[in-house]
């Protein structure tokens, strides 16, 4: 019996292509992209002071665009290419050739073009998360240089080492389902390190930094949460039962974490903080990421309880006691929400990882790898369980060391030619001094903006105002 006409292989749909998998992979990638644009653009632009709304949102938007060009230019091949440049990365090469883009990807039943797009949105959101630690004082020109350098010399090394089949940690059997190490631990450590070198915000901003729009902040947070369906659900590279499990575990852990954080805020501070609940949501999403499709539902709830309490403790208690944490101005607390939560998720993955689920995800029969310590103790394979835990801890040490060193070197190199921090005058004014634009036009601002636009485009090119002062468009 022959296949239906729409399933017959042809030049545009070769025999190896699974249309369902390809459609889901493109959808999942777009969901992850929406986490950044507009998700984190909105979240950053609304959670900061009004005078930093444009700058914060635009740091995210710029990073998204810049990473894409770097990714197809050389980044993808460095992270996932076949040729090994050095032990920790692939050989830089362009990913724009038609033959390469239409060939089957190294994993999954879809073309390289789909894989490149899917992996790009992960690289982009990593840089945008780093920006969260630097909001409110980093020189935008320095940020423009930082993004391609960090993507090239840090992200690609982490991705190749843990995710590429030829990577040394991948060969050891590390479990990082969807980026708890490569994305979240990396961004948390790199953001904290960069914040150290950039320096703090203005004293007034650091002491009081109220959101300019909490409702918009929640809209951005909602896009971030729901976009995680693609973030974790896309990593089996197939429309599989494991993808379904990963999606459900993601939302179960996140909801548990949010509620745990909220309860702690009420118990210790007396009020249900909306910003606190958002932080709890983020730590839950981050913690489940390295484990999403390889742990059972009850483990996802336990991970949510710990991700809603341990990062809460480090942020609310330890942060005020540890000298280094007090010295570094981490605007969005990415050290706690991503570095701490990402490390916690990696360790708990090493404990709760289910051998059968790992076999489904990794499609391997090698039971020496991917045995969580809990199951190792239960089945009498304690050596394998402790080995897995050791590999998870080794991954944390590697990612932390990599990002502290590389991020420091990048910041030191940039500041030789471009100041990392804005001037004191720019710090006082904010968006208007940096971009010549502001997020909210208040009464009396119309003449200022018309004058500025006239100076840029010329008075005769700018549409004249109407009888009531409104701009008349053609």
Image (tube, grey):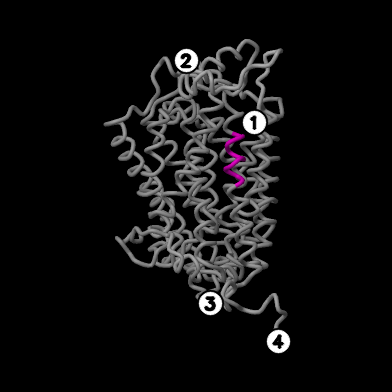
Label 3 to label 4, Cα distance in Å? 34 Å
Position in image of residue 301 (x %, y %): 68, 51
| Nearer-N-terminus badge (2/3) | 3
Q: Is residue 184 above or below residue 380?
A: above
Q: Residue at x 64, y 63 (%)?
A: 23
Asked if the residue under mark 2 is in contact with the one under mark 4, i.e. CB atoms within 8 Å, the reply is no
Mark toward the start of the polypeptide (3 vs 4):
4
Secondary element under disc 1, as helix, strand or loop, is helix
Mark 4 element type: loop
Indicate which disc, 3 or 1, sits on the residue closer to the N terminus: 1
> Does the magenta run of residues contain 264?
no
Nearer the camera: disc 3 or disc 4: 4
Give whichever of 150, 180 is nearer the camera: 150
Residue 408 image position (x, y, % from top left): 33, 38
Against 7, residue 132 (above or below) is above
Task: Determine the secondary structure under disc 3.
Answer: loop
User: What predominant SS class does the magenta segment belong to?
Assistant: helix
Mark 1 vs 4: CB contact within 8 A: no
- Residue position for label 3: 365
Q: Left or right: 26 with respect to 381?
A: right
Q: Tell me the SS state at disc 2.
A: helix
Residue range corresponding to the magenta coloring: 34-43
Q: Kindly identify the residue that appears in the image at 68 percent across and 18 percent down.
A: 470
Count of numbered circles in the view: 4
* Label 3–label 4 contact, CB within 8 A: no
| Gap in angstroms between the C-alphas marked 4 and 2 | 71 Å
- Measure the C-alpha gap from mark 1 to mark 4: 57 Å
Label placed on residue 428: 2
Nearer to the camera, 213 or 285: 213
Q: Which of marks 4 and 1 precedes in the sequence?
A: 4
Residue 206 seen in this snapshot: no
């Amino acid at each position: 019996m022959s296949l239906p006409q729409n399933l017959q292989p042809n030049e545009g749909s070769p025999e190896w292509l699974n249309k369902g998998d390809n459609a889901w992979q493109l959808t999942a990638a777009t969901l992850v992209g929406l986490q950044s644009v507009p998700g984190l653009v909105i979240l950053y632009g609304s959670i900061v002071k009004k005078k930093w709304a444009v700058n914060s949102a635009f740091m995210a938007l710029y990073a998204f665009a810049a990473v894409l060009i770097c990714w197809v230019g050389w980044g993808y091949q460095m992270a996932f290419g076949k040729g090994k440049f050095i032990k920790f990365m692939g050989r830089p090469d362009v990913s724009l050739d038609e033959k390469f883009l239409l060939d089957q990807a190294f994993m999954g039943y879809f073309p390289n073009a789909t894989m490149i797009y899917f992996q790009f949105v992960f690289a982009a959101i990593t840089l945008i998360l780093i920006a969260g630690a630097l909001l409110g004082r980093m020189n935008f020109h320095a940020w423009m240089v930082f993004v391609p350098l960090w993507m090239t010399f840090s992200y690609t090394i982490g991705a190749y080492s843990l995710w590429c089949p030829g990577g040394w940690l991948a060969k050891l059997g590390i479990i990082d389902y969807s980026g708890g190490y490569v994305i979240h631990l990396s961004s948390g450590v790199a953001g904290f390190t960069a914040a150290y070198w950039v320096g703090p915000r203005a004293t007034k901003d650091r002491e009081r930094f109220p959101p300019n729009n909490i409702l918009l902040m929640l809209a951005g947070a909602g896009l971030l949460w729901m976009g995680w369906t693609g973030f974790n659900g896309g990593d089996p590279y197939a429309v599989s039962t494991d993808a379904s499990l990963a999606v459900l575990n993601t939302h179960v852990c996140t909801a548990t974490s949010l509620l745990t954080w909220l309860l702690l805020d009420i118990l210790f501070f007396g009020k249900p903080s909306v910003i606190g609940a958002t932080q709890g949501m983020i730590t839950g999403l981050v913690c489940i990421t390295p484990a999403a499709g390889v742990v059972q539902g009850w483990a996802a709830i336990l991970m949510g309880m710990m991700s809603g309490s341990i990062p809460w403790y480090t942020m609310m208690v330890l942060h005020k006691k540890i000298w280094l944490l007090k010295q570094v101005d981490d605007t969005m607390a990415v050290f706690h929400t991503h570095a701490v939560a990402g490390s916690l998720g990696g360790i708990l993955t090493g404990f709760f990882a289910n051998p059968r689920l790992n076999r489904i995800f990794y499609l391997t029969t090698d039971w020496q790898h991917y045995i969580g310590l809990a199951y190792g103790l239960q089945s009498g394979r304690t050596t394998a369980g402790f080995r897995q835990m050791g590999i998870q801890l080794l991954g944390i040490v590697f990612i932390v060391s990599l990002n502290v060193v590389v991020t420091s070197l990048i910041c030191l190199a940039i500041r030789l030619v471009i100041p990392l921090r804005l001037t004191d005058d720019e710090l006082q004014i904010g968006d208007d001094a940096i971009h010549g634009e502001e997020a909210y036009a208040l009464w009396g601002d119309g003449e200022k903006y018309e004058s500025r636009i006239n100076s840029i485009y010329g008075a005769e090119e700018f549409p004249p105002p109407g009888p009531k002062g409104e701009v008349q468009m053609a």
